Amino acid sequence: MLSSDGTWISISSVYEGGWAGSAYSWTGGFPVAGGTGNYLDSGGSSGTYTVVLVTTSSTNYATHGAYVTAMGGGDDAAHSCVGMPIVAQS
């Protein structure tokens, strides 16, 4: 989940089958721009790790429709995420 200010990604997972007969879960997160992330698992292990932002890019398309039109339409352009909102519109 992306934080409301768009700077942090949080991840939570549960291994439903368990680990060696025990339930297992993992939570953690990291900064979108890279930096120090953290984690905690249900076994009590916790720690930090480094996330490196390798590349980022942006476009000048106002909307997904503008991108699809500029690409001449078609399935590849329509299924691309370019121009789609990062957060759901309410």
Image (cartoon, rainbow, N blue to C red):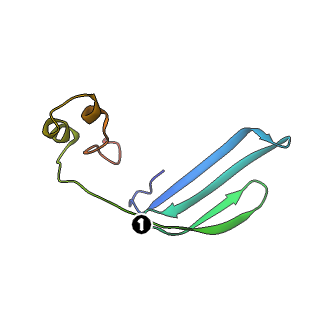
Near mark 1 (Cα within 10 A), the count class, few <14, some 14-19 or many ≥20, is some
Report the amino acid beneath label 1.
Ala
Q: At which x and y percent is residue 84? A: 28, 43
Q: At which x and y percent is residue 2? A: 44, 54
Q: Toward which corner of the image does residue 7 lie, by quadrant?
A: bottom left
Q: Toward which corner of the image does residue 41 lie, by quadrant?
A: bottom right
Residue sitting at 48 percent across and 67 percent down? 52
- Asked whether, in this view, residue 15 is left or right of residue 11, the answer is right
Residue sitting at 78 percent across and 40 percent down? 18
Q: Is residue 64 above or below residue 29?
A: above
- Asked whether, in this view, residue 42 is left or right of residue 33, the answer is right
Residue that lies at the very extreme toward the top in this rendered image:
75
Q: Is residue 29 above or below residue 66?
A: below
Badge 1 marks a residue whose secondary structure is: loop
- Asked whether, in this view, residue 22 is left or right of residue 54, the answer is right
Residue sitting at 22 percent across and 40 percent down? 64
Q: At which x and y percent is residue 69? A: 14, 36
Residue that lies at the very extreme toward the right in this rendered image:
21
Label 1: which residue? 33
